[in-house]
Image: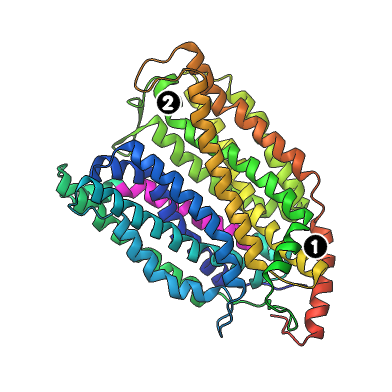
Amino acid sequence: MKQALSLKEKIGYGFGDFASSMFWKLFSVYLLYYYTDVFGIAAGVVGTMFLITRIWDTALDPLIGVLSDRTQTRWGKFRPYLLWVAVPFGLIGVLTFTAPEFSSTGKIIYAYVTYTLMMMIYSAINVPYASLMGVMSADTRERTALSTFRFVFAFAGSILVLGSAESLVEWFSDGKTDQQALKTGWQASIAVYALIAVVLFYLTFAWTRERITDLPAQKSNLSADLKDLARNKPWFILLGAGVCTLIFNSLRDGSAVYYFKYYFGGNSQGIALLGMQFSYSTLYLVLGQAANIVGVVLAKLVSDRTGKKNTFIGAMLLATALSIVFYLCSPQDVFLVFALQILISICAGSIFPLLWSMYADIADYSEWKTGRRATGLIFSSSSMSQKLGWTLGGALTGWILASYGFQANAVQNEAAQTGIRYMMSLIPAAGSLLSVGIILFYKLSDTYMIDLSKELSRRREARGEPRN
């Protein structure tokens, strides 16, 4: 069934991930530095805190999904969370980057409390936001378009933070580098990002609409929903392929700084652009984000012609081949390294909208097969798997470094340099190749989903539900 969405609604949906991704990038790039160098907490303590809070946050996602599936309001199931949680999201975000004058123990307690609350509030708004796509349209191609808008805006939010955070902190700090000035600079800068995020979440709420509703006869039954998920083979297949893809990405991202510092010749090297000096590692990461956007756009164009599954396979096979070539690069191959980063990132970027669009298809498949709809549970459990993939990729980065004899802040021996090169090339290539092997078993082709969508449309029309 065709359910064309307006450009305004697609942009509105994209605004939600622009807001979320700004803070995700702040957490992944700057929060450790903030805790150690600004707030004054030991790095080991922060690392333990990240592990503990991430485990709790991962377990929370399915609970949020179950709760949102059972939410009933005049605005729908998922949109209300954007309205209710936007302001707490912004406030807790500012508090997370606030550094009160506490004792050492008091600082640790404050960090645990605020970061845990931040991760909880992030899940409370992001899980319903992701699930919203599954009920905005039943058209599989429109869902791919929504995913495209979502991730274009997501990477744009990441680029905004990467390009502006340090300059914004410096401006609010009046160029001073003492601790108090930096505390003020970070708090004020995060307040700016928080205000932007709140406004964008409200726009997502206002500009989107839920069209697909539960079956009238469906009763709230968590046990039945979990049993349905356990029998959903396409979900398990996509879960495995998605985890492998995320390991591919997180290994390459987590290894980049080590690659340029210990193999490529040091982060002091860089390129002057527009009167500013950019280190190789910074330029490498920013270019990767920009190339991800290109991949997101191409995913829609290519998948409309070849199908989502075939696009996924083609992108990951190409990423595998390019990653193997990356292993052959030497510190003299500056142009080749950056060219390969752009091409690999285009391939990787194309996967994210495909994954989330396919999860929406899986929600439809589950409804068709079982007569029950649990969109929030499917999307939240999938979100949980994404976080587990990133966590596993990060852990592998540390384990591999240790296994090759890596020593921090020292000249690395040949074995350690080889290990770092493996983490940027051959090991991620193995992950991407494994994802291809798993996705081959995925049976929900675009043609299959069009037929399935028509059948669901007939069922919904028989229940008297509107087409749009």
What range of the chain is rendered magenta? 145-165
Q: Earlier in the sequence, mark 1 or mark 2?
A: 2
Residue 273, percent from left and from top: 35, 36
- The relative height of residue 133 versus residue 30 in the rendered view (above or below) is below
- The relative height of residue 54 versus residue 376 in the rendered view (above or below) is above
173 or 47, which lies in front? 47
User: Which residue sits at x=68%, y=72%?
Assistant: 4
User: Which residue sits at x=70%, y=67%?
Assistant: 223
Q: In this image, 125 relative to 439: left or right?
A: left
Which residue is identified by label 2? 260
C-alpha span from label 1 to label 2: 45 Å
Q: Which mark is residue 196?
A: none
Instruction: Describe the element under mark 1 as helix, strand or loop.
Output: helix
**Can see residue 92?**
yes
Q: Which secondary structure class fits the magenta region best?
A: helix
Which residue is identified by label 1? 449
Residue 12, percent from left and from top: 51, 69
**Can see residue 317?**
no
- Quadrant in which the C terminus is drawn: bottom right
Residue 456, percent from left and from top: 80, 73
As shown in the figure, which amino acid type bears the numbered disc 2? Answer: Phe
- Quadrant in which the N terminus is drawn: bottom right
Choose top left, top right, bottom left or bottom right for residue 166: top left
Circle 2 residues within 10 Å: few <14, some 14–19, many ≥20: many
Q: In this image, 163 relative to 71: left or right?
A: left
